């Protein structure tokens, strides 16, 4: 079982234009349009990883397994570098913001972009590199993603695409301070949108926390969702 990310098509990405100060920012995806192809590449690595793990288990040291490992490591390293280097591109027409409402919305979409970037880094280290939940390489971006999600709420900007970075980072939270941030954002998101996928995501997240607290420190949210009979849909 896996969540579903509803991303724009190539044509959608090409149609984003700099029309005016704030209309230059796509309402749904903010400033992350050019990050989506990288996220798709990242998401595709999970199937490659599963095939590689199976091949290395069945035929360790064989040429095919070695070749697959080399290709996987190269792809992962390239995506990791690209993620860390990525920054949102602010359209030239938005450099000068004239009204407080426009500035608030800009800050919101900038933080939405940061939340997506940091959540992608969480996914990379947790799901692709199989780092333990307690690893600083997981906890640091998870904390940053949650804080960025909170700032999106504070600046009252578009939240239609916020569930994925929120859920991805919240499920890795192990400290009360981070869980409280996640709880606040989930509550606000549910009140504002009232969609079932948000409620489901929150239920799965709380169960992940419960499992962590009773000693299942590295249980994944997919396993929890399957056991609960839930499907988390991001979109």
Image (cartoon, helix red, strand yellow):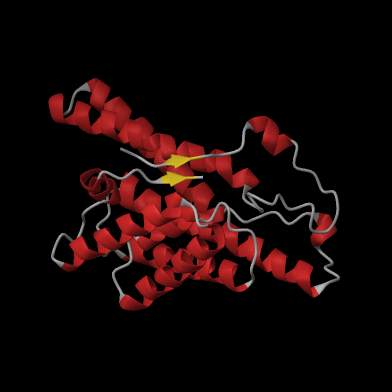
Which quadrant is home to the N terminus? Answer: top left
Q: Position of 128 compared to 11: left or right?
A: left
Residue at 51% x, 65% y is 191
- Quarter of the rendering containing residue 44: top left
Is any atom of residue 224 visible in this view? Answer: yes
In x, y percent, where is residue 24? 78, 52
Is any atom of residue 120 visible in this view? Answer: no
Residue at 35% x, 43% y is 231
Residue at 53% x, 56% y is 162
In x, y percent, where is residue 196? 44, 51
- Is residue 106 positioned above or below 71 on the image? below
- Quarter of the rendering containing residue 201: bottom left
Q: Position of 42 compared to 12: left or right?
A: left
**Outermost bottom residue:** 177
- Is residue 74 positioned above or below 81 on the image? above
Nearest the eye: 196 or 59: 196
Q: Position of 35 compared to 47: left or right?
A: right
In x, y percent, where is residue 10? 65, 31
Residue at 47% x, 42% y is 78
In x, y percent, where is residue 17? 80, 44
């Amino acid at each position: 079982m896996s969540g579903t990310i509803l991303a724009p098509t190539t044509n959608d990405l090409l149609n984003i234009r700099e029309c005016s100060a704030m209309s230059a920012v796509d309402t749904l995806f903010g400033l992350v349009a050019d990050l989506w192809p990288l996220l798709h590449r990242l998401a595709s690595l999970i199937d490659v990883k599963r095939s590689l793990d199976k091949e290395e288990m069945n035929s360790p040291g064989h040429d095919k397994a070695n070749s697959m490992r080399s290709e996987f490591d190269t792809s992962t390293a390239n995506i990791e570098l690209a993620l860390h280097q990525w920054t949102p591109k602010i359209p030239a027409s938005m450099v000068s913001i004239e009204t407080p409402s426009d500035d608030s919305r800009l800050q919101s979409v900038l933080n939405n972009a940061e939340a997506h970037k940091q959540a992608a880094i969480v996914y990379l280290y947790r799901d692709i590199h199989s780092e333990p939940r307690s690893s600083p390489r997981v906890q640091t971006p998870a904390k940053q993603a949650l804080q960025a999600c909170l700032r999106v709420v504070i600046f009252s900007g578009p939240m239609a695409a916020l569930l994925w970075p929120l859920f991805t980072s919240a499920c890795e939270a192990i400290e009360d301070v981070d869980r409280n941030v996640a709880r606040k954002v989930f509550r606000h998101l549910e009140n504002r949108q009232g969609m079932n996928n948000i409620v489901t995501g929150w239920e799965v997240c709380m169960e992940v926390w419960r499992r962590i607290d009773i000693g299942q420190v590295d249980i994944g949210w997919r396993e929890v969702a399957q056991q609960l009979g839930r499907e988390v849909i991001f979109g």
